[in-house]
Amino acid sequence: MVCVFLAALTAGTATGSWQAEGTPWLAAPAGGSEPDGSAGQAGGESDGNSDGNSDGRAATGDPAAATADGEPPAGDAALLVSRSGDRWAAAYTAEEYEELQLSLEGGYVGTGIALHRTPEGTIEISRVHSGSPAALAGVRAGDELLSIDGEPVGGVPVTEAVSRLRGSDQPGGARAGSTVRVALVRDGVRWQAELKRAVLETKPVTVDRDTAGVTRIRLESFTAGSADLVRAAVENAPESDGLLLDLRGNSGGLVTEAAAVASVFLDGGLVATYDVYGEQQALYAEPGGHITRPLVVLVDGGTMSSAELLTGALQDRNRAVVVGTPTFGKGTVQMPIEQPDGSVAELTVGHYATPSGEVVEDGEGIAPDVVVEDGEDAVARGRSVLEGLASGA
């Protein structure tokens, strides 16, 4: 059995946008007792993105038809999931799970293209990974995607286009070195490119300081090492700066990384509790965090799972003001179980709660302290709140 616990996160259809072909998923170390937050990340789909294991629906029913000892029956993962009644469940072939493990380490096999649907209904390149096969072939943000390997993408879901870019329809899934042909349009001119998939690294943390007195840290997913990047960003920020932690569109990741990020801003104490088949566990922050700097957390409907766990901890502990719109509402914990044929079934085993004991209800999420209205600039609103915190208002 694979002893890895996942608080599965999804984003795709929940937000209407997918992060190209390979969003990182998150899982706790093998053999560990802490849950993990797996994720199909929301945002614009980058081919390093896993398609995600769910569409934002709440889990229902038992994790599986359990045997007498409480363990789900062994067998083919797809069959097990289909019989589970678990709407958060997911099944992976051995090859797909291998790719998942790679994504947990912050890498993925893909072309480096991120996609989104335009208001006109076309699929457009929203971002190109620097140094990726797509970048080397001259693909740019703003190019319209017409077809993949000769198959038109007009009218197909963005998730399907992502799947084609990843090559998940190929036996065994896409491998580094396999190729994919794309047809694109730029400034009315149609052109084609053949891209060779490669192993690419994700960049879960970006930092900017385009406003004096504010350092914005955007955390896109909780992959291995993301907490260290957040800590470095805080320690490198000017001492006079307030901190804007941007978790919008963060569909989750490794729960252990979420707890480590909490440790950056807290001086020890409870981060969350969770249960696994009814057995209670707890996550704690390490002492010595940065507790004096003003902190605002930005959230939206794409903030999910481990990102909600972190948000709830900082909000309950009165460490941050949460600004934005209600989060997605994904408070369940999943556990991947390896089957005799090498496939893996991911099944719900419990729920987690914030330090105050509040369970993150499926589909309800966490309410922000300050609501961002439709059409309002969330970052600008967050900066305004930070200014108020810094002035003592």
Image (tube, rainbow, N blue to C red):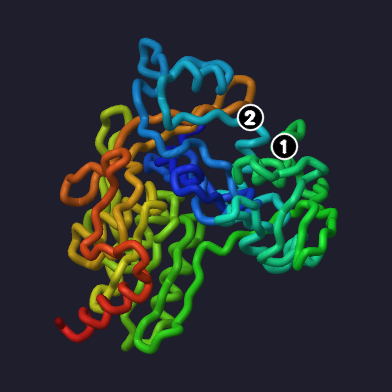
Around disc 1, counting alpha carbons within 10 Å, would you say few (fewer than 14), some (14 to 19), or many (20 or more)? some
x and y percent of residue 203 in the render? 57, 64
Task: Please name whichever residue, 162 or 377, is drawn nearer the observer in this view of the structure.
Answer: 377
Name the residue at 72% across, 34% down. 169
Vertical position of residue 332 compared to residue 194: above or below: above
Name the residue at 42% across, 28% down. 87
Vertical position of residue 105 compared to residue 64: above or below: below
The answer to which quarter of the image holds residue 51 is: top right
User: In the figure, is residue 386 to the left or right of 74?
Assistant: left
Identity of the residue furthest to the top in this view:
68
Q: Quick check: can you spot residue 266?
A: yes
x and y percent of residue 340 in the render? 60, 20
Q: Quick check: can you spot residue 6?
A: no
Q: Which label's residue is closer to the chain start, 2 or 1? A: 2
The residue tagged 1 is 173
Secondary element under disc 2, as helix, strand or loop, is: loop
Secondary element under disc 1, as helix, strand or loop, is: loop
Around disc 2, counting alpha carbons within 10 Å, would you say few (fewer than 14), some (14 to 19), or many (20 or more)? many
Q: Distance between the residues labelled 2 and 1?
A: 9 Å
Kindly indicate whether the residue at mark 1 contacts the one at mark 2 (C-beta within 8 angstroms): yes
Name the residue at 19% across, 45% down. 358
| Mark 1 residue type | Gly
| Mark 2 residue type | Thr
Name the residue at 34% across, 62% down. 374
Task: Please name whichever residue, 278 or 252, is drawn nearer the observer in this view of the structure.
Answer: 252
User: In the figure, is residue 9 to the left or right of 181?
Assistant: left
The C terminus is located in which quarter? bottom left
x and y percent of residue 160 in the render? 64, 40
Which numbered circle lies on residue 93?
2
x and y percent of residue 150 in the render? 82, 43
Task: Please name whichever residue, 18 or 48, is drawn nearer the observer in this view of the structure.
Answer: 18
